[in-house]
Amino acid sequence: MLFYERIKKHEYKFSDTEDSIVEYIVNNKEEVVKLSIKMLADKFYTVPNTIIRLCKKIEYDGFSQLKNNLKEELKENKNDSKTGFELNIKKTLELLDFENINRVVDLIYKSRNIIFYGIGQNEPLCEIVTKELKAKDKNVNYYNQRHEAFNYINKLKEEDLIFIISLSGKTKDVVEASKIASNNGCKIVALTHICENELQKNADINLYCYSSLSKINEYNISDKVPIMIVLRAITEKYWSIY
């Protein structure tokens, strides 16, 4: 897993000091691989234990492993042995954060009304997960017509939840839906490809999969299996607990 992917997966756990350290590492990888743990800690007027705790949070054994992984990332000839759907599945499984999955499951259990919202090719995925959660008699719905979806999104309140699926996190309708829900005080869960996007800024919980945009003759052929992996992890956890 790349350093960027690790920090996106766990960024909700970081303190202000850790945020600063992470930002520094992202912008200065070539320098960081040459630093000792004390030298890096001194730059932030903190102690080596702070760096060690950060390393553990992002799933490194310690600072040495972090540096070694950064060195690998800096090699221009670095290649992954897996490509295509194999790479997408491998990285999505690495990105699964079961602490966040449990938070989402808890929200689903406690929420009065739940809407799954996705457009285009994501609509069938919303239908699948909706039916799976209804198996436990949960009040959960999806809508395949924009006007109908927004009619219900506008009615969402603090005790409700909207789960938005969008690989890019930039589509106009999903961003608008998240803003409306946020203004109403509704809880928001976003599931996107691991990238910087507008949708994640409005979400209470961000979940990530790995499936970058792919097109043939302008037709979107992006891999949907990674989305279903995350959704399946949620539904199985929900079934097992409730």
Image: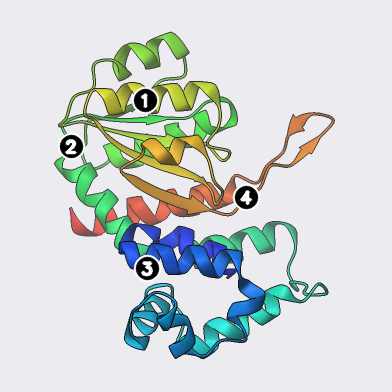
Chain-order first, disc 3 or disc 1 = 3
State the separation of the CA atoms marked 3 and 4: 28 Å
Residue 4 occupies quadrant? bottom right
Residue 196 coordinates in the image, percent (x, y): 54, 46
Kindly identify the amino acid type of the residue bearing the numbered disc 3. Glu
Chain-order first, disc 3 or disc 4 = 3
Kindly identify the amino acid type of the residue bearing the numbered disc 2. Ser
Indicate the secondary structure of the residue bearing disc 4.
loop
Q: Residues within 10 Å of mark 4 (few under 14, many from 20)?
A: many
Residue sitting at x 38%, y 11%: 148
Q: Nearer the viewer, mark 2 or mark 1?
A: 1
Chain-order first, disc 3 or disc 2 = 3
State the separation of the CA atoms marked 4 and 1: 24 Å
State the separation of the CA atoms marked 2 and 1: 19 Å
Return the mark for residue 211: 4
Indicate the secondary structure of the residue bearing disc 3.
helix
Residue 130 coordinates in the image, percent (x, y): 36, 35
Kindly identify the amino acid type of the residue bearing the numbered disc 4. Ser
Q: Residues within 10 Å of mark 3 (few under 14, many from 20)?
A: some
Say which of 65 and 146 sits in front.
Answer: 65
233 in relation to 167, above or below: below
Q: Residues within 10 Å of mark 2 (few under 14, many from 20)?
A: many
Residue carrying label 1 = 179
Residue carrying label 2 = 111
Kindly identify the amino acid type of the residue bearing the numbered disc 1. Lys
45 in relation to 218, above or below: below
